[in-house]
Amino acid sequence: MSAEPRSSTTDRGAFDRGAADRGAVDISIEMLFGLLAVILVLLLMFEAVAYWHARNVFDDAAAEGVRIAAAFDGTCDDGIATTLAAIARHAGSWAEGVDVGCSDGPMVTVTVRGVTPGVVGGPIGFTATVSESAPRER
């Protein structure tokens, strides 16, 4: 059994011909699309968190406003002012375009409607509407 010396240039040449750069480019493109998909999923997740946070702020403010408006000596104007103050206190600058409505009667209802803060930019966001009701005290 005689071992013939193998040339390292022959082995390397065969390896170089079998592996082309196109495989690396294909994987890079797949990684690019995968990265874009992960970024899109993260942005959607952040947007959902911002939406639920805004709904919670609006809901807490509406509950406070309806409690004041439904009180024995309360009015819808007092409820709206309390709601706007609570939103300004908790939300800050991203809740500037909030619309608060109040309907008076045996059941007092305070409705808050506003745009949630967008993750990508300020004007991009969802519209959240929250209503809270309470019976009028006699």
Image (cartoon, helix red, strand yellow):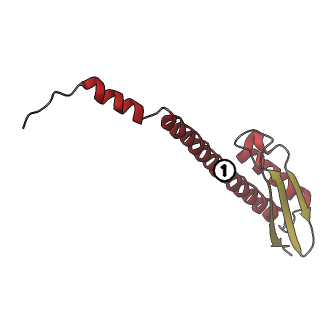
Q: Residue furthest left?
A: 1
Indicate the quadrant containing the C terminus: top left, top right, bottom left or bottom right.
Answer: bottom right
The answer to which quarter of the image holds residue 9 is top left
Figure check: 35 above or below 51: above
Residue closer to the observer: 95 or 43? 43
Q: Is residue 40 left or right of residue 80?
A: left
Q: Position of residue 38 (x, y in %)?
A: 58, 46
Q: Answer whether residue 82 is visible to the viewer in this image.
A: no
Indicate the quadrant containing the N terminus: top left, top right, bottom left or bottom right.
Answer: top left
Q: Position of residue 2 (x, y in %)?
A: 8, 34
* Residue drawn at point x = 76 percent, y = 62 percent: 63
Q: Position of residue 42 (x, y in %)?
A: 60, 47
The answer to which quarter of the image holds residue 104 is bottom right
Figure check: 53 above or below 67: above
The answer to which quarter of the image holds residue 29 is top right
Q: Position of residue 88 (x, y in %)?
A: 77, 45
User: Looking at the picture, which amino acid does disc 1 mark?
Assistant: Leu
Within 10 angstroms of label 1, few (less than 14), some, or many (20 or more) residues? some
Total marks in image: 1
